[in-house]
Image (spheres, helix red, strand yellow):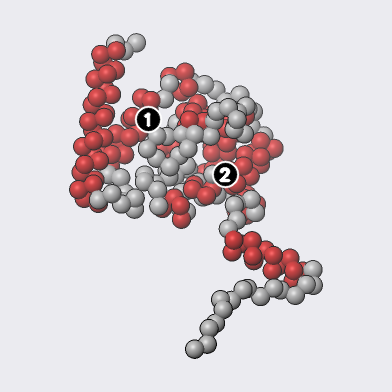
């Protein structure tokens, strides 16, 4: 087990590294969230995240057996809660994802897939400080029994093999904006034989 002095020294080095990386980045890109983190900043952030994850969390095994039912439940849950930032395919190629700093990781990539199940579960439950990743665990949340988070871990493992059919199903469960709802209402009225309601137009004032 590491001595407290060694742990403190490591944390101090990481903190100083983050400060230096942040200073360099600010001088280069200002405070824009559109900027891309440097390789140094990314490496330091990953090291800090690894150090912050409890050892017992890293070694925790997924208690939820994989099955088609678990995959579908997690897939639709991901579509409704996670895809707005991560995308249905986990790439992070979304409007909100592009506006975050740092950008959401590609969940299909090795950097995520090589994490242990316990690591991924801990991130889902506790979030990642100073990023757009919130904590979904805790009392009073729908993740309170932790089953949903463990099922999401199963789905994240499946992301590299996601099929076009599964993505199409997920699109039906993505959160919808006003324009999408208006389009659905028009389609429903058309199928039911009701006349489409014209979109309201701003009043015109004659001079």
Residue drawn at x 30%, y 36% as measured from the top left: 43
Locate residue 61 relative to residue 67 in the image: left or right.
left
- Could you say which quadrant of the image residue 111 lies in? top left
- Could you say which quadrant of the image residue 112 lies in? top left
Q: Nearer the viewer, residue 132 or 148?
A: 132
Q: Nearer the viewer, residue 127 or 195?
A: 195
- Judging by the rendered image, the residue that carries numbered circle 1 is 49
Q: CA distance from mark 2 to mark 1?
A: 23 Å
Outermost residue toward the front in this view: 207
- Judging by the rendered image, the residue that carries numbered circle 2 is 81
Counting residues from the start of the chain, the first of labels 2 and 1 encountered is 1
Q: Nearer the viewer, residue 181 or 36?
A: 181
Locate residue 127 relative to residue 71 in the image: left or right.
left
Residue drawn at x 59%, y 64% as measured from the top left: 179
Locate residue 136 relative to residue 110 in the image: left or right.
right
Q: Local crowd at mark 2 within 10 Å, few (<14), some, or many (≥20)? A: some
Q: Nearer the viewer, mark 2 or mark 1?
A: 2
Tell me if residue 73 comes above or below residue 187 in the rendering: above
Tell me if residue 166 comes above or below residue 203 in the rendering: above
Quadrant holding the N terminus: top left
2 and 1 marks in contact (CB < 8 Å): no
Residue drawn at x 45%, y 39% as measured from the top left: 133
x then y, percent, for residue 104? 43, 45
């Amino acid at each position: 087990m590491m001595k407290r002095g060694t742990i403190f020294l490591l944390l101090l080095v990481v903190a100083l590294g983050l400060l230096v990386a942040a200073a360099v980045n600010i001088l280069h890109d200002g405070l824009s969230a559109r900027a891309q983190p440097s390789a140094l900043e990314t490496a330091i952030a990953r090291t800090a995240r690894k150090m912050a994850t409890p050892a017992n969390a890293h070694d925790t095994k997924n208690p939820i057996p994989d099955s088609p039912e678990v995959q579908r439940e997690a897939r639709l849950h991901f579509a409704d809660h996670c895809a707005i930032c991560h995308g249905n395919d986990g790439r992070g190629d979304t409007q909100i994802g592009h506006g975050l700093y740092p950008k959401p990781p590609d969940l299909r990539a090795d950097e995520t897939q090589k994490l242990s199940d316990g690591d991924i579960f801990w991130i889902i439950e506790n979030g990642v400080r100073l990023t757009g990743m919130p904590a979904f665990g805790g009392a009073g949340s729908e993740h309170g029994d932790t089953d949903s988070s463990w099922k999401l871990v199963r789905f994240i493992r499946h992301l590299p093999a996601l099929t076009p059919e599964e993505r199409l199903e997920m699109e039906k469960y993505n959160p919808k904006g006003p324009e999408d709802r208006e389009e659905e209402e028009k389609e429903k009225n058309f199928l039911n034989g009701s006349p489409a309601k014209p979109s309201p137009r701003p009043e015109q004032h004659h001079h």
